[in-house]
Image: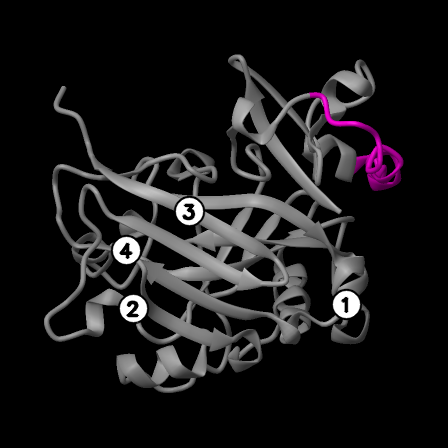
């Protein structure tokens, strides 16, 4: 099941994508749920599943994709978490997950442009697997962690590298307005119970720059859920962005930065393909 958040004629909604097009669950379940996050909070993914085989309300071309969870309470991002990326940065393997947060206004949906800010040209891609939490998780042991996963999506952790390296804290470089993306949809966890089977590839203008199995994670998904839920309650609709493989633009010689006119694709086999173009920030 592929759950989406979208706008249709300027009105935000949520629903499903199937072979016939877009099913507008927001309209069909009118008054019951306001968005995809509220479906997760209510534990009501079954109501979406019941709509999966109905005729589409409109075509995919009629919508604008929003981030899968546009209003996530928490977006927790993991840095330095693929063994290949750890090696290329010259770092030691961390003892604990390296965590930072992203703000909701720093991300856009599938097919929306990413904005290169006017204060920097060091705009890097980071293809990542996003994990969407399906029920409240607190002090969850690894052995039970996968029971708390609603599904998976693709994420581009667009990073402004010079700002990221201003201090030891990553926050500034990871939160520029509309610099990252999240989508196109959430596949529910029942479609693939083992996320280690996923394979991630990042392409810039068709050139493959990252290519790695998710099994190369230093801290796997159960470990991340156990660790994160030990210090904060994970709520339905919260997102854990699990880290990026080796091959980022910053470490290449010369560096490869995203620039206006480029197209960047995050392709995770079994999950989806997230595509965005790059534009420059408009002058005030």
For the residues marked 4 and 1, what is the alpha-carbon distance in whole angstroms?
32 Å
For the residues marked 4 and 2, what is the alpha-carbon distance in whole angstroms?
15 Å
Q: Dot 4: within a 10 Å radius of its alpha carbon, few (fewer than 14), some, or many (20 or more) residues?
A: few
| Badge 3 or badge 1: first in the primary sequence | 1
| Quadrant of image for the C terminus | top left
Q: SS at mark 2?
A: loop
Residue 63 visible in the current orientation: no
Q: SS at mark 4?
A: loop
Magenta stretch, residue numbers: 41-57
Q: SS at mark 1?
A: loop
Q: Dot 1: within a 10 Å radius of its alpha carbon, few (fewer than 14), some, or many (20 or more) residues?
A: few
Determine the main secondary structure of the stretch shown in magenta: loop
- What label does residue 205 carry, if any? 4
- What label does residue 193 carry, if any? 1
Image spot of residue 263 (x, y percent): 30, 48
| Badge 4 or badge 1: first in the primary sequence | 1
- What label does residue 275 carry, if any? 3
């Amino acid at each position: 099941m592929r759950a989406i958040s979208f706008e249709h004629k300027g009105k935000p909604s949520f629903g499903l994508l199937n072979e016939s097009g877009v099913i507008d669950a927001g309209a069909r379940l009118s008054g019951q749920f306001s968005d995809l996050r509220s479906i997760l909070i209510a534990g009501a993914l079954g109501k979406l599943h019941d709509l999966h085989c109905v005729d589409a309300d409109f075509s995919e071309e009629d919508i604008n994709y929003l981030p899968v969870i546009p209003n996530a309470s928490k977006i927790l991002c993991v840095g330095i978490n693929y063994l290949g990326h750890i090696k290329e940065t010259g770092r030691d393997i961390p003892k604990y997950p390296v965590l930072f947060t992203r703000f909701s206004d720093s991300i856009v949906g599938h097919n929306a442009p990413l904005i290169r800010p006017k204060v920097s040209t060091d705009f890097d891609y980071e293809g990542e697997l996003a994990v969407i939490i399906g029920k409240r998780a607190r002090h969850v042991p690894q052995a039970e962690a996968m029971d708390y996963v609603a599904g998976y999506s693709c994420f581009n952790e667009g990073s402004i590298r010079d700002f990221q390296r201003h201090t030891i804290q990553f926050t500034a470089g990871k939160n520029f307005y509309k610099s990252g993306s999240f989508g196109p949809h959430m596949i529910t966890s029942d479609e693939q119970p083992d996320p280690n089977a996923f394979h991630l590839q990042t392409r810039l203008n068709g050139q493959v720059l990252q290519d790695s199995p998710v099994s190369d994670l230093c801290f796997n998904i159960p470990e991340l859920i156990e660790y994160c839920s030990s210090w904060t309650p994970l709520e339905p609709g919260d997102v854990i962005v699990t880290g990026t493989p080796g091959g980022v633009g910053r470490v290449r010689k010369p560096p490869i930065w995203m620039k206006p006119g480029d197209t960047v694709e995050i392709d995770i086999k079994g999950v989806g393909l997230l595509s965005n173009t790059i534009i420059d920030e408009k002058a005030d």
